[in-house]
Image (cartoon, grey):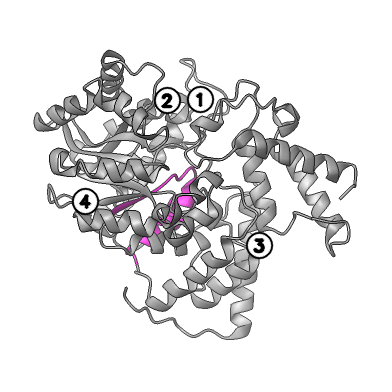
């Protein structure tokens, strides 16, 4: 990793700039107005695809979390098409050319909205990735129909990067039923041979046995890329930081192992969850201060993106950028990318060591668990809880020095961020959500835990 020289800055200037940054971040987070961002002046960093020689932007656009319209359109679409058009125009103008979507994203509308926005640009300006997502009907006919719809939704006659979606959950039995017994993998290989698919790969979630066994198929299938969760916490601490069922799998769940196995075979890596569901963009104040002391202009998110982008076998790093200021911040990080120095890597490993024992719930806000049949805002509840963890607003006892302030912040924030009818006390524990969670979170148990915690705060019984 390249060594980067940090310019000196006086203590007074540092404190002043850190204060300005802190105020701006709070305004943005609280919805009190958008903070004007600097323009992006550098050139995007690209990686060369080893199969085609194409230049792929190291920053990839994840199209799961498009901005929502104030009310659904006449056709029922909940996404703000004009906002998406503007974001994609700005991204392409500044060098982003990789766009990742799926049939299930955006309540089933992401492909359609993304396709409309991209259609306004020359086909050679963008690379599109989409997926064969999970379905209750695993028949060849139903999955073929899903595949064909992606072409219609995206308004393209070939797909650059096509993925078997969410490999790992359900073990090899489910993998075989989804792609082997019904002949779908053979079908997709044939589609690649005919040029309808340029690259064939898969995204991994969970069961390391499935990862290893599907990777063994490389000699026959010749996987063109694999998408994995990679960030500076999951690099060596995934089994300690993520859900209980992952802990039993040991160090093989770590991104360091996954990346190493792919690099040995020369299979390019697409990175998902570089911010660990946003948690690495919202680090604790002491960590943020340390980051600013080292690189005053970098956000916490920039540190995480630089980590993910510094590995040479990474083809692109996906980010779900809902707002223009997120896009601009990420463009500055990748235009061009400044690789981590060895000392910066050691610093992030130290941060990860401290984070692995945190109280965070490992939700990445993917919304695969949604919709809840009883209307529970699962990810909204988890996001609020994790935010309070990061801000020190999880009192454990009434003797805590900041008990009253933290108690008030948690309860008021809970009611503001999650409507009362969608809060954890309405969960009946049906468990329909748990099997869909790629992080393996025991969602009903966590809902019960949070509900009990809220009740104790309300009754002042901690």
Q: Position of residue 125 (x, y in %)?
A: 22, 42
Camera-nearest label, 4 or 1? 4
Q: CA distance from mark 1 to mark 3?
A: 32 Å
Among the two numbered marks 4 and 1 on one chain, the one whose residue lies closer to the N terminus: 1
Task: Identify whether 444 is placed above or below 261.
Answer: above
**Which part of the image, by quadrant, shows the N terminus?**
bottom left
Task: Give the residue number, with chain letter if any, for mark 3.
Answer: 23
Task: Give the residue number, with chain letter if any, for mark 1.
Answer: 78
Is residue 333 located in the magenta-colored stretch of the structure? Answer: yes
Mark 3 secondary-structure assignment: helix
Residue at the location (56% across, 40% down)?
441
Figure quadrant of residue 163: top left
Task: Identify whether 283 is placed above or below 223.
Answer: below
Residue at the location (17% across, 27% down)?
186
Among the two numbered marks 1 and 3 on one chain, the one whose residue lies closer to the N terminus: 3
Mark 2 secondary-structure assignment: loop
Among the two numbered marks 3 and 2 on one chain, the one whose residue lies closer to the N terminus: 3
Task: Give the residue number, with chain letter if any, for mark 2.
Answer: 109
* Start-end of magenta stretch: 314-337
Residue nearer the viewer, 331 or 51: 51
Q: Residues within 10 Å of mark 3 (few under 14, many from 20)?
A: few
Q: Residues within 10 Å of mark 2 (few under 14, many from 20)?
A: many
Residue at the location (65% across, 70% down)?
19
Q: Residues within 10 Å of mark 1 (few under 14, many from 20)?
A: many
Among the two numbered marks 4 and 3 on one chain, the one whose residue lies closer to the N terminus: 3
Task: Give the residue number, with chain letter if any, for mark 4.
Answer: 267
**Contact check, label 1 and label 2, Cβ < 8 Å:** yes
Whether residue 194 is visible, yes or no, is yes
Residue nearer the viewer, 313 or 90: 313
């Amino acid at each position: 990793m390249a060594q980067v020289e940090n310019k000196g800055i006086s203590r007074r200037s540092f404190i002043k700039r850190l204060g300005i940054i802190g105020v701006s971040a709070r305004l943005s987070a609280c919805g009190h107005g958008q903070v004007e961002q600097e323009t992006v002046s550098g050139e995007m960093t690209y990686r060369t695809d080893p199969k085609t020689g194409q230049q792929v932007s190291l920053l990839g656009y994840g199209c799961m979390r498009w901005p929502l319209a104030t009310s659904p359109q006449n056709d029922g679409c909940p996404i703000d098409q004009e906002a998406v058009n503007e974001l994609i125009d700005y991204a392409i103008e500044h060098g982003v050319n990789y766009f990742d979507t799926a049939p299930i994203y955006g309540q089933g509308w992401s492909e359609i909205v993304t396709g409309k926005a991209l259609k306004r640009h020359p086909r050679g300006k963008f690379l599109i990735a989409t997926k064969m997502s999970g379905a209750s009907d695993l028949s060849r006919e139903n999955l073929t129909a899903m595949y064909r719809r992606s072409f219609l939704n995206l308004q393209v006659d070939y797909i650059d990067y096509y993925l078997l979606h969410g490999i790992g959950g359900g073990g090899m039995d489910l993998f075989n039923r989804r792609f082997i017994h019904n002949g779908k993998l053979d079908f997709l290989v044939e589609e690649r041979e005919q040029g309808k698919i340029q690259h064939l790969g898969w995204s991994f979630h969970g069961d390391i046995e499935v990862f290893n066994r599907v990777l063994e198929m490389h000699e026959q299938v010749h996987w063109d890329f694999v998408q994995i969760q990679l960030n500076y916490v999951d690099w060596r601490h995934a089994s300690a930081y993520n859900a209980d069922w992952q802990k039993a799998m040991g160090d093989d769940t770590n991104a360091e192992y996954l990346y190493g196995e792919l690099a040995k075979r020369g299979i390019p890596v697409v990175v998902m969850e570089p911010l660990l569901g946003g948690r690495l963009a919202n680090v604790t104040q002491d960590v943020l201060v340390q980051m600013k002391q080292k690189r005053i202009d970098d956000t916490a998110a920039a540190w995480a993106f630089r980590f993910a982008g510094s590995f040479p076998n990474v083809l692109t790093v996906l980010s779900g950028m809902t707002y223009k200021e997120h896009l601009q911040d990420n463009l500055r990080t990748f235009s061009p990318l400044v690789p981590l120095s060895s000392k910066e890597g050691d610093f992030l490993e130290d941060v990860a060591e401290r984070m692995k024992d945190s109280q965070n719930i490992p939700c990445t806000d993917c919304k695969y668990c949604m919709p809840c049949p009883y209307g529970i805002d699962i990810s909204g509840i988890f996001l609020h809880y994790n935010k309070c963890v990061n801000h020190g607003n999880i009192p454990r006892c009434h003797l805590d020095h900041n008990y009253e302030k933290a108690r008030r912040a948690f309860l008021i924030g809970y009611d503001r961020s999650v409507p009362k009818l969608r809060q954890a006390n309405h969960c009946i524990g049906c468990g329909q959500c748990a099997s869909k969670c790629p992080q393996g979170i025991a969602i009903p148990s966590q809902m019960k835990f949070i509900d009990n915690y809220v009740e104790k705060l309300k009754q002042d019984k901690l």
